[in-house]
Image (cartoon, coloured by chain):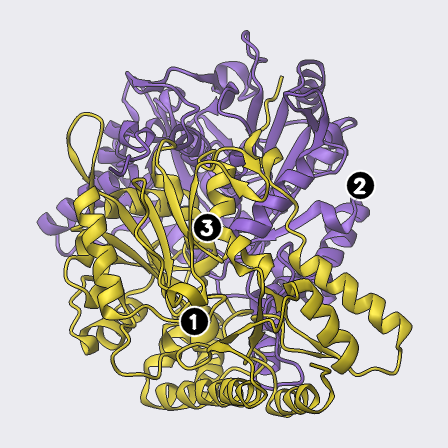
Chain colours: A yellow, B purple
Amino acid sequence: MLKLNENYLKLPGNYLFAEIKNRVNAYKALHPQAEVISLGIGDVTRPLDKKIIDTLHEAVDEMAAAETFKGYGPDQGYRFLIDAILENEYAAKGVALEPDEIFISDGAKCDTGNFQEIFGLDNTIAVTDPVYPVYIDTNAMAGRAGAFENGRWSNVIYMPCTAENNFAPALPKTKADIIYLCSPNNPTGTVMSREELKKWVDYAMENGSVILFDAAYSAYITEDDVPGSIYEIEGAKETAVEFRSYSKKAGFTGTRCAYTVVPKALKARSDNGEWVSLNKLWARRVSTKFNGVSYIIQKGAAAVYTDEGKRQTANTIAYYMENARIIREGLREMGFQVFGGVNAPYIWLKVPGSMTSWQFFDKLLNEVNVVGTPGSGFGPSGEGYFRLTAFGSRENTQKAIRRIQEGLDL
Amino acid sequence: MLKLNENYLKLPGNYLFAEIKNRVNAYKALHPQAEVISLGIGDVTRPLDKKIIDTLHEAVDEMAAAETFKGYGPDQGYRFLIDAILENEYAAKGVALEPDEIFISDGAKCDTGNFQEIFGLDNTIAVTDPVYPVYIDTNAMAGRAGAFENGRWSNVIYMPCTAENNFAPALPKTKADIIYLCSPNNPTGTVMSREELKKWVDYAMENGSVILFDAAYSAYITEDDVPGSIYEIEGAKETAVEFRSYSKKAGFTGTRCAYTVVPKALKARSDNGEWVSLNKLWARRVSTKFNGVSYIIQKGAAAVYTDEGKRQTANTIAYYMENARIIREGLREMGFQVFGGVNAPYIWLKVPGSMTSWQFFDKLLNEVNVVGTPGSGFGPSGEGYFRLTAFGSRENTQKAIRRIQEGLDL
């Protein structure tokens, strides 16, 4: 008789975005004339840049002739893309990596979710709180999170990140084997400084832990001293895996391409005392459960690193970051306590007074027809916060802030 | 201290294609003038058909304008593709399925590998022998295969498929909870009849087992009475998951698109006695560890179902199947015992005399400079067999068979 993975049955329903949709639909049903503006979802809205479009067309044409047609590609990705990443994302920042340390994937969500598969089930995981839910849910599905009780998993170490600690998680009191960090952070929009990251790399070194570093938003860093890669920190090659993505860097949320860095120096001891390279284990996972990213899409991603591609994607990012400025400054003028939005496309605001995140959601929707995301949806320590995103159009962003300034009854 | 998934360390190196490459390279080094023809690898060589190319271009252009740009799509796939699948692949064969029973994925390899994640670790798996290695390896990585001893996993039921039993696996003597079947079969090129499939569906029904049915090659079926979908068999919706792919149907090996069917009627009992739909569990897995297939690629896949697309892909498949006929008949004329190649792009031949699969490999390479795949690489019961594929060019296929006919010393 077939036995299920019972861990799946412990998962709470992930109702955050479904609940948002329900409340918005209910409002619209009552107010059919209302023009609701969403600054809620973390999805891009600008079209792909011209150089990327041109290159995608070229790649499609290659698939039309036997001489240039591409069948199965290398599981880890094509060298033209890997080499462009090594040169532009790493060598340019003084980080030397080798081609077989890069794994091209179809998304940072997939790889941050899949990576735990190469670890044993008896590791303790630590996550910042609030957090991107995929880190926890995938560990829960594998059976590593324990039981879900009162909104928390019993075997997960939650590290609160709030205004009180300046969104810098404290080192855990109990030992953590697998540590998820995300900078620039989703949802708070804050970043980890060089010193903060160094503290974590040292902790991982001392405790034989691994850091799974989600840098999906690194392209949005505007301040010089903020590290865009954990490998800018000494010792990180022995302690950290890094996840990057074209989703936000180049508008690839619907086009799908990302990459994961697993340095060969990163090792763990097996039960028989042998040091095993995580790179080797991940390569085995990738070659067995994955078959590479579409050639066409990899070509499009590589176009990001041409001169035109760099210029065009930088312009698009600047467009979103101007939205972030409009939101941040607009709210600050009103007296809101606002975080993020400088090195990230997310603005994290403290809900005024003693309102809950959901109460503020309702207020914003009802009074000015603007939709955001309640912070409590990202974890217990997100309560009392609210996320707005810079991924809307300029017009909608300006209109939303004007409405909040003129119409919100504070 | 980080603990590894020790199951990965039990995996034997998968040296089949690496060993082939080594031997070919060694031969070429000694004979630099030799023109070696490969009928070994299961990868397509014909370009994408025109309608698909045109549609990919259109989809790329949609990504170039804000009005038609697509960000994150539905995790399970776009309805335009799902609806085309329902109509053309299933309704046309009298099989009624619902849209949320189809999951668009980036490859049948990925999904046949990932699907076991929703099952408990204490299930017994059964595979045909020879077999596509991904089924076993992914179960071994999850910890479900036991120990690897003398070329076999201790917790895996191997079901021999040889000329002696007409490549029809016998029902296992010990109970199997998860059964992997593949028809048209890779590597043997043989197919399961309606009666054979019915026997398995009945077995699964009686024993509360699930059948994971790999139909990646269904587009190559030429005989009317061979079922292309397991859902043509009564009871299969309660017992089977089906995997399909555009890799071989439309030349998408490097373009990446496939789909998995999980009927809502397919259920298993949880530890607390509740009947749980596998569809619900798989949907949860997909929404948490995957983020959908590229919009551009899904549009290209949907083009397969237009009138032009159908005509063009049928022509390409006919091209490969003519290669299969040339190989099959050419070898048969020489007295070889040959299987497959009628409803599948694979020809499975009995190695003459008492040669092993690898001895025949060397003979073919040395005497006529033709490369194939030793059957023993697909499992113990593959010993004494050899796989040739129909995916080469017509010219190379004809030349290879001529060389075998004229130059092989039998």
Residue A104 falls left or right of residue B91: left
Residue B256 locus on image (x, y percent)? 50, 58
Q: Residue shown at 36%/29% (left/top)?
A: B375
Is residue A54 depicted above or below A24 in this figure?
below
Image location of residue A391, percent across then percent down: 56, 79
Q: Is residue B381 visible?
A: yes
- Assign a secondary structure to mark 3: helix
Identify which amino acid the numbered label 1 is placed on.
Tyr
Where residue A289 sits, quadrant-wise, is top left
Q: Which residue is mark 1?
A: A246
Question: In the picture, which quadrant includes the C terminus of chain A?
Answer: bottom right
| Foreground label between 3 and 1 | 3
The x, y position of residue A174, in whole percent, is 32, 40
Disc 2 and disc 3 on one polypeptide chain: no
Residue denoted by label 2: B95
- Determine whether the residue tagged by mark 1 lies in a helix, strand or loop: helix
Mark number for residue A135? Answer: 3
Tell me the element at label 2. Answer: loop
Q: Are marks 3 and 1 in contact (CB under 8 Å)?
A: no
Query: Label 2 vs label 3: CA separation?
Result: 38 Å
* Viewer-side label of 2, 1: 1
**C-alpha distance separating marks 3 and 1:** 19 Å
As drawn, A287 above or below A409: above
